[in-house]
Image (tube, helix red, strand yellow):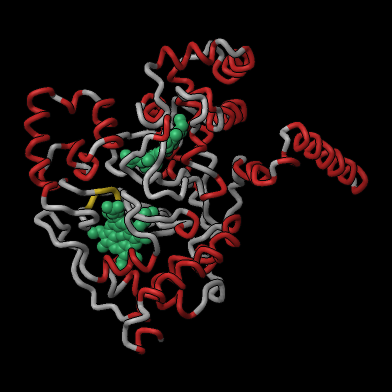
């Protein structure tokens, strides 16, 4: 038994070594970590098994062949017009499945309007994108491929023709779906791969599971503030059954508010009436990613006044590898984010009623950030520590001219 296991282990190691050489990993060390973009284990403290089971649609069950195909598509530049862009360009595993840019850069170096959210735990979101314009990962996956400034393909037919010309894909689609390449199955495979990227097992998950020493005193005070005086939990909802720090709703918190937004909203309503933009999902996608209408947030999807400049409450896990923050990447550090909420956001006619000045001390702000830092999954712990130090220093540099008590 023991002996067999040893042989098995050696065989696995040898196979890994062969695979590594075949992929050229030896020569490109930064790519070595890519193997960790592989499907995750469900044995993580805090993993919400029931919720996860419900997040998998009946018409797209998880199978190993489909997941592997999705993983290949996720890193394949042939899904883009310039054959450079791939999902992974903007959702890079080593950067917590983001690009760590303010806003993303797509085909021909075109600059988008929005910050790339992480793929980690995206399967739990009831709507996708900052404005919730997609309602499933399958629907979402088609958008970037056809968006002119992201991957820039001109039609689904063009995408399908590309992949049909590649014999290996023909074969893999047949194995995964039992039919030839088509656009819906491309999206299904991508979604299935994304549904393997759940991320829990953080120090905070261990704390909630009963290990009271898993987080330190500052983080514990931060958690109390988060659920109490700072009111964060009223939007970033948390329960053991739904441990995702989001209410899956949309709120105007005043991020990047400009008075001109309201004027623009009025103009967009007229445009909707005239051209019925809402009927055309692709047009909404183009408005959101490529134009200043991005700042209208959820309004572009619903046309409802109360949704002007409202954005989806994001998950708060792994924040120290997904900087900068907010839908436009306008907050470089977590201290900037907390300061935004502490001041009561940016006042505007559509500001959410739950956003009010909080009167938090500098110590309170530090404690909140210490709590947020405990939401880091093990694979990102080292990177997160470095980023925490960097952000801490940046927050202190800003305070140089502030009173001495602000320095703790
Ligand atoms: C050029 C950069 C770029 C590329 C390439 C790209 N994305 Fe994104 N992705 C973004 C940005 C930016 C957003 C947010 C856009 C918005 O909210 O309007 C986003 C949003 C998402 C979301 C929604 C996450 C959430 O929680 O709402 C998913 C899922 C996603 N992308 C998957 C993919 C897949 C799959 C591909 C490849 C087919 C891909 N992306 C290609 C930049 C990119
Ligand atoms: C009224 C609801 C609401 C409250 C209260 C609230 N948030 Fe948020 N939070 C949001 C929304 C919505 C966004 C996205 C805003 C945007 O990008 O325009 C956000 C964004 C964030 C982000 C950025 C995440 C990312 O990936 O970009 C962090 C961090 C955050 N909030 C932490 C907090 C903390 C800490 C508190 C309490 C001090 C708090 N929030 C209170 C709704 C809320």
Q: Is residue 263 left or right of residue 1?
A: left
Q: Is residue 165 left or right of residue 391?
A: right
Determine the residue positioned at 14% across, 46% down: 261
Task: Tell me the quarter of the image containing the N terminus.
Answer: top right
Q: Is residue 12 left or right of residue 3?
A: left
Residue 307 vertical placement versus 70 (above, below): below
Determine the residue positioned at 28% across, 75% down: 229
| Position of residue 332 measured from the top left corner of the image (x, y, whole percent) | 38, 60
Task: Tell me the quarter of the image containing the C terminus.
Answer: bottom left
Q: 402 or 314, which lies in front?
A: 402
Q: 404 or 383, which lies in front?
A: 404
The quarter holding residue 330 reads bottom left
- Furthest toward the bottom, the residue is 404
Residue 134 vertical placement versus 312 (above, below): above
- Furthest toward the right, the residue is 3
Determine the residue positioned at 36% across, 89% down: 404
| Position of residue 145 measured from the top left corner of the image (x, y, whole percent) | 41, 26
| Position of residue 305 measured from the top left corner of the image (x, y, whole percent) | 10, 44
User: Regarding ligand 1, which quadrant of the image does it lie in?
Assistant: top left
Residue 237 seen: no
Residue 376 seen: yes
């Amino acid at each position: 038994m023991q002996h067999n296991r040893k042989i098995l282990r050696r065989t696995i190691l040898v196979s890994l070594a062969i695979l590594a050489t075949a992929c050229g990993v030896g020569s490109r060390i930064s790519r070595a970590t890519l193997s960790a973009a592989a499907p995750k284990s469900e044995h993580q403290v805090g993993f919400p098994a029931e919720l996860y089971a419900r997040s998998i649609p009946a018409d797209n069950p998880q199978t190993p062949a489909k997941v592997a195909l999705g993983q290949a598509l996720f890193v394949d530049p042939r899904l883009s017009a310039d054959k450079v862009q791939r999902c992974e360009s903007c959702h890079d595993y080593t950067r917590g499945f983001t690009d760590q840019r303010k806003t993303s850069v797509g085909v021909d170096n075109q600059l988008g309007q929005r910050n790339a959210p992480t793929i980690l735990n995206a399967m739990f979101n009831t709507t996708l994108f900052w404005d919730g314009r997609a309602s499933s990962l399958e629907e979402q996956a088609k958008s970037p491929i056809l968006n002119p400034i992201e991957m820039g393909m001109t039609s689904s037919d063009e995408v399908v023709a590309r992949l049909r010309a590649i014999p290996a894909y023909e074969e893999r689609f047949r194995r995964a779906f039992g039919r030839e390449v088509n656009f819906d199955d491309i999206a299904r495979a991508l979604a299935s791969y994304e549904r393997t990227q759940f991320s829990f097992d953080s120090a905070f998950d261990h704390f909630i599971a009963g290990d009271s020493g898993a987080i330190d005193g500052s983080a514990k005070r931060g958690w109390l503030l988060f659920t109490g005086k700072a009111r964060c939990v009223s939007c970033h909802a948390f329960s053991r059954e739904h441990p995702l720090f989001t209410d899956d709703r949309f709120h105007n918190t005043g991020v990047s508010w400009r008075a001109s937004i309201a004027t623009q909203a009025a103009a967009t309503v007229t445009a909707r009436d005239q051209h019925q933009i809402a009927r055309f999902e692709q047009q909404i996608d183009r408005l959101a990613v490529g134009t200043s209408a991005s700042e209208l947030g959820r309004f572009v999807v619903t046309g409802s006044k109360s949704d002007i400049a409202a954005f989806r409450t994001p998950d708060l896990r792994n924040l120290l590898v997904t900087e900068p923050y907010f839908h436009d990447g306008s907050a470089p550090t977590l201290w900037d984010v907390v300061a935004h909420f502490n001041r009561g956001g940016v006042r505007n006619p559509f500001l959410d009623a739950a956003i009010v000045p909080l009167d938090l001390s500098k110590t309170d702000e530090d404690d909140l950030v210490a709590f947020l830092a405990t939401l880091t999954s093990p694979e990102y712990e080292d990177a997160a520590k470095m980023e925490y130090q960097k952000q801490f220093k940046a927050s202190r540099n800003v305070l140089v001219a502030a009173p001495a008590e602000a320095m703790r």
